[in-house]
Image (spheres, grey):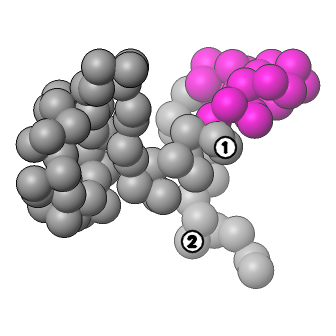
Amino acid sequence: MTNTNITNFRKNVFEYINQAIEFNDIINVNTKNGNAVIMSEEEYNGFIETLYLSSNPAMVKQLKESLSEPFETMISVDDVEW
């Protein structure tokens, strides 16, 4: 996570946005009225998907069960007929 103040953010907005997009960096911008967080759309979408999956008890149960499965028992994507 990168922290900056609003003055530096304004001076270097392109560089900060590019940093968020290219490196999935989270930019914390401090102002006198509070802070703002800048992140890439890809990072945001991943965050929202994680929140959605975590809010579904059946999905959480399924994810926990799959984590306890031995790796050797899992099938490869190459073994799935599409």
In the image, what residue type sits under mark 2?
Answer: Asp
Left/right of residue 30 with respect to residue 80 in the rendered view: left
| Mark 1 surroundings within 10 Å by alpha-carbon count, few (fewer than 14), some (14 through 19), many (20 or more) | few
Task: Tell me which numbered mark, 2 or 1, is placed earlier along the sequence.
Answer: 1
Q: Residue at x 57, y 59 (%)?
A: 76
Q: Viewed as shown, does residue 7 lie left or right of 61? A: left
Q: Is 14 above or below relative to 44?
A: below
Instruction: Examine the image and state in which quarter residue 48 appears.
Output: top right
**Closer to us: 10 or 40:** 10
| Rendered image: mark on residue 78 | 2
Position in image of residue 61 (x %, y %) = 80, 20
Which quarter of the figure is the N terminus placed in?
A: top left
Q: Is residue 39 left or right of residue 58?
A: left
Provide the residue designation for mark 1: 49
Residue at far front of view: 32
What segment carries the magenta color?
50-69
Q: Residue at x 58, y 51 (%)?
A: 45
Q: Quadrant of residue 21?
A: bottom left
Residue extending furthest toward the bottom: 82
Q: Between residues 23 and 78, which one lies in front from this camera angle?
A: 23
Query: Residue 33: where, in percent of width, then height?
Result: 38, 20
The stretch drawn in magenta includes residue 55: yes
Please, what is the three-letter code of the amino acid marked with disc 1? Glu
Q: Main secondary structure of the magenta part?
A: helix
Label 2 vs label 1: CA separation? 25 Å
8 or 77, nearer to the observer: 8
Is 48 on the left-hand or right-hand side of 12? right
Residue 27 can be seen, yes or no: yes
Task: Give the percent coordinates (x, y) of residue 16.
Answer: 19, 53
> Would you say the residues marked 2 and 1 are in contact, meaning their CB atoms lie under 8 Å apart?
no
